[in-house]
Image (cartoon, coloured by chain):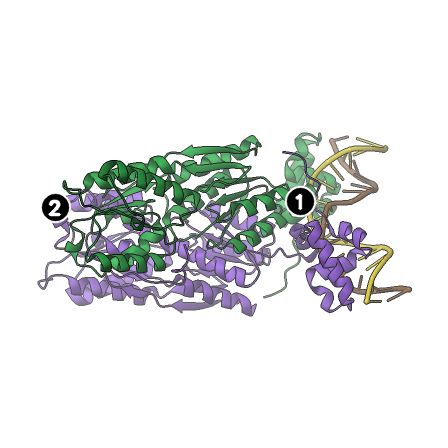
Chain colours: A purple, B green, C yellow, D brown
Amino acid sequence: MPRKKQKPTIYDIAEVSGASPSTVSSVLNGSWKNRRIRADTAQRIREIAASQGYSANLQARGLRKAKSGLVGMILPVHDNRFFSSISQSFEANARERDLCPVIASTLRDPQEEIRTVETLISYAVEAVFIVGATDPEALHRICSAANVAHIFVDLPGPDAPSVVSDNIHGARLLTQTILDEMPADKGQARPYFIGGVADDYATSRRIEAFRSVVMETLGGMEDDQIIACGYAPGRAAREIAALCDRMGRLPEGLFVNSLTAFEGVLGHFVTLPHEAFDGSVIGCYDYDPFGAFLRFPVHMMRQNSDALISAAFAQFDTGDFSPRLIMIKPDLIAPRTIYRGRFVEFG
Amino acid sequence: MPRKKQKPTIYDIAEVSGASPSTVSSVLNGSWKNRRIRADTAQRIREIAASQGYSANLQARGLRKAKSGLVGMILPVHDNRFFSSISQSFEANARERDLCPVIASTLRDPQEEIRTVETLISYAVEAVFIVGATDPEALHRICSAANVAHIFVDLPGPDAPSVVSDNIHGARLLTQTILDEMPADKGQARPYFIGGVADDYATSRRIEAFRSVVMETLGGMEDDQIIACGYAPGRAAREIAALCDRMGRLPEGLFVNSLTAFEGVLGHFVTLPHEAFDGSVIGCYDYDPFGAFLRFPVHMMRQNSDALISAAFAQFDTGDFSPRLIMIKPDLIAPRTIYRGRFVEFG
DNA sequence: ATGAAAGCGCTAACAA
DNA sequence: TTGTTAGCGCTTTCAT
């Protein structure tokens, strides 16, 4: 590739225009409203800059101003409908504020979370949005040591604003729906809960809600009806297979705790005949448009990713990073219903 | 929030340790292997740095070295399984090279693509990966004017390396499969192709492949069997509804050209009774694990996102950015089959 | 209405 | 084996 000449700097523009670097700088970054610069000099400088293909070196600006124009977000995985919707909203919100989004996935590895947040801080991000962290305390410590604004989303963290789904409400509603749809003689029914990590904030509340609704409705429940086997599809696939094996059929009700777990569950379901699903009611906490149209009906709780992120940014805008918990209600999406979101005319 | 003291710099560490800033710098950034620095001074400096919570200011380093440690990627949308898998692979590949990924979605807006690439360049990204661009020429011009390495993925661009799916192969295979699965008396059958933009590189080749296989197999085809209505779900929903309306039923064969279009199609399908699908064979170019388990069987072409991105990074590693076209074959995923990818044990 | 100059935190010659 | 120094490109007082 032929070595092109370097990107022009304000000094190049200054030289060509005959103005000083500081004048050029203020014209080109908008701060010239304060400095009283003649409209025509400003205009001339802008034209020269355009003709030279000038664009500011954002690293230099960031260094000088001790801020970068970047906003960071970390999340567990990209390739999952909940988190990728989060990314989509994050991007839109960041752009509205003229910030450049930096989104990183950490595969629920606490070490990776820490490294990533440290990297973001080293780039002087204006804030970091922490989605579904496994070790919120550590991340909080790091951010506040560096005096970096941070907001927790989905899973709350200590001593900072947190925007979370109303898990109790959502899980109660989903559990109730599953039980309602089960055949009339629920006496012996043993609905199961699968996926997630029992100590996680979100999972623990969902389990609690599941348990209490089951107790209220069926009058009893045993511990083995909770299979908190993590989020990985592979693990969920093995667990559901083992469960079906033990029972000799599918459970009457199944509460799947995340899309990733659901993906795993599906990995087993593909091996089953159509009739296998007849006696079962299945619900999933989190929504996927394709998941809504499976071979069997699925009740889905759609976390309002857009509302979660918008609320987090609204908090960011206030500049107040004192602890508070903001709850967003998720929506129950009936089987075979397609939710139409903000981005339906894009793709 | 109590105002913490500023982040320590190499000067702070230098002062405490009694060494000079350059010594500190080289110790802390690894370049001390060349400078022969005593192991114990290095050790002492590292300890002091750790105790002070030092971490390098990457903007300053980037400014000085005229590179940032960032790699950029732009893609149409996040919340779609194909693109979010691309993100997942991009992230993994970037990390392996100690680069910080910056992923931005541009909603297929050419202006937004341009602005975004300019922003990335202003941050001095080491390369930009351009996925599914609508205006590759413009992006190429911008990148090469700024002398920034760039690689096209999914949709090829001019005068730069491009890694694309083997669309002809994939679309032929998918079309053939759809036709094969159709009822024996195919004489009058009119399979349809829906989604995408007819001038797009990928779509145009897929249409071409679709057309030629249909011609070979059925002996004829008319132009209205191609509905290149773009990628937006909303639009695809309206088009398929209109088509079904005109035909009074579903077409015998349907080739859906992207997941976003498929989502739209599904938006109409949810209104149809189960039997409506009996006489239809449906295929989708692109894979989604939930899409693989719908109420009706779907044949899916899985673009190998991991291979696409890995090949792109392999090219990046060579440092050679001269034009070349690298083809990656997609895989046909049979209905009701779950593909197990690289990240199946994460979630 | 504009310019000169200092300095953000870091790296890389060049000295010593 | 280590220190001194000159910038990277920009913003921002402070002068004029």
Spot occupied by residue A207 in the image (x, y as percentages of width and height): 28, 59
Q: Image quadrant of residue A166?
A: bottom left
Q: Residues within 10 Å of mark 1 (few under 14, many from 20)?
A: some
- Residue sitting at 23 percent across and 43 percent down? B335
- Residue sitting at 48 percent across and 47 percent down? B133
Pinpoint the chain carrying mark 2.
A
The image shows residue B187, relative to residue A196, as above or below, that is: above
Spot occupied by residue A83 in the image (x, y as percentages of width and height): 40, 54
The image shows residue B31, relative to residue B236, as above or below, that is: above
Image mark for residue A300: none
* Secondary structure of the residue carrying numbered label 1: helix
Same chain shared by disc 2 and disc 1: no
- In terms of depth relative to the viewer, which is nearer, A211 or A346? A346
Q: Residues within 10 Å of mark 2 (few under 14, many from 20)?
A: few
- In terms of depth relative to the viewer, which is nearer, A119 or B230? B230
Pinpoint the chain carrying mark 1.
B
User: Distance from label 2 to label 1 (Cα)?
Assistant: 62 Å
* Secondary structure of the residue carrying numbered label 2: loop
The three-letter amino acid code for the residue at tag 1 is Arg
Q: Is residue B29 left or right of residue A303?
A: right
Spot occupied by residue B302 in the image (x, y as percentages of width and height): 33, 40
Give the residue number, with chain letter if any, for mark 2: A248
Give the residue number, with chain letter if any, for mark 1: B61
- In terms of depth relative to the viewer, which is nearer, A249 or B101? B101
- Residue sitting at 72 percent across and 68 percent down? A33
Spot occupied by residue B107 in the image (x, y as percentages of width and height): 46, 55
Q: Quadrant of the N terminus of chain B?
A: bottom right
The three-letter amino acid code for the residue at tag 2 is Gly
Callout in the foreground (2, 1): 1
The answer to whether one can see residue A30 in this image is yes
